[in-house]
Amino acid sequence: MRFLCCLCLLLPLTTHAEPEKSSRTKPACEVLCAELFAAVRANPAQLTMRLEDALVIDESCTGEIVTTAIDAVKADPSLVRKISKTAMDLLPSKKDVIMAAVKNYAAPVLVAKTQPREEIRRPELPDVPRHRPLPGEEIRRAELPQVALRHSDAEVSVPQVPFNLMSVPKARPLK
């Protein structure tokens, strides 16, 4: 009797078992788009066939697939028209998604890694107190003789500095 009761209780549990999952599952949108991109770049002549295959495999990724196809052909206007026409012919119910993907397409921007800037430090002068004149001291500036030059009615004064080339030391020979 107990055996019969246990069997009656276990029977409903076994009949509601989960159905077997199919061995083939849909690939994720990212994988599908990556495969489409690689296939179109490798053989641009098969663009229409590859696009149709991708759209048939997963209709829910229509926008991403169209954007990837446009990116794969480097947004060539004649091929963009071909992509949108093929997608609309195959999936007329997704017309709005396809048009939005075409209108909102923006080419990916490569961001270059910038080199970190080297910090430029200016030399810092030590805090040296300025010489203050003592009471009764006078500060005079050096005065150089002035030579006047005339150039197109403008006078320019240039200080005349005597050059003494004899005081320059001779170079030593290298060993």
Image: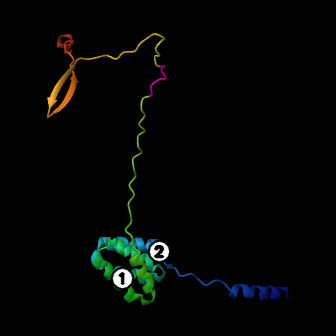
Q: Position of residue 86 (x, y in %)?
A: 35, 85
Q: Is residue 92 rendered magenta in the image? A: no
Residue at position x 68%, y 86% from top?
Answer: 16
> Could you tell me the amino acid type at mark 1?
Ser
Q: In this figure, which residue is indicated by the disc labeled 2?
A: 29
Q: Nearer the viewer, residue 137 or 100?
A: 137
Disc 1 on helix, strand or loop?
Answer: helix
* Quarter of the image that includes the C terminus: top left
Q: Nearer the viewer, mark 2 or mark 1?
A: 1
Q: Please state the extent of the stretch shown in magenta in the rendering.
A: 124-129
Q: Is residue 147 above or below residue 40?
A: above
> Could you tell me the amino acid type at mark 2?
Cys
Q: In this figure, which residue is indicated by the disc labeled 1?
A: 84
* Quarter of the image that includes the N terminus: bottom right
Q: Is residue 128 rendered magenta in the image? A: yes
Residue at position x 36%, y 15% from top?
Answer: 140
Q: Nearer the viewer, residue 163 or 50?
A: 163
Q: Position of residue 152 (x, y in %)?
A: 14, 34
Left or right of 97? Residue 165 is left
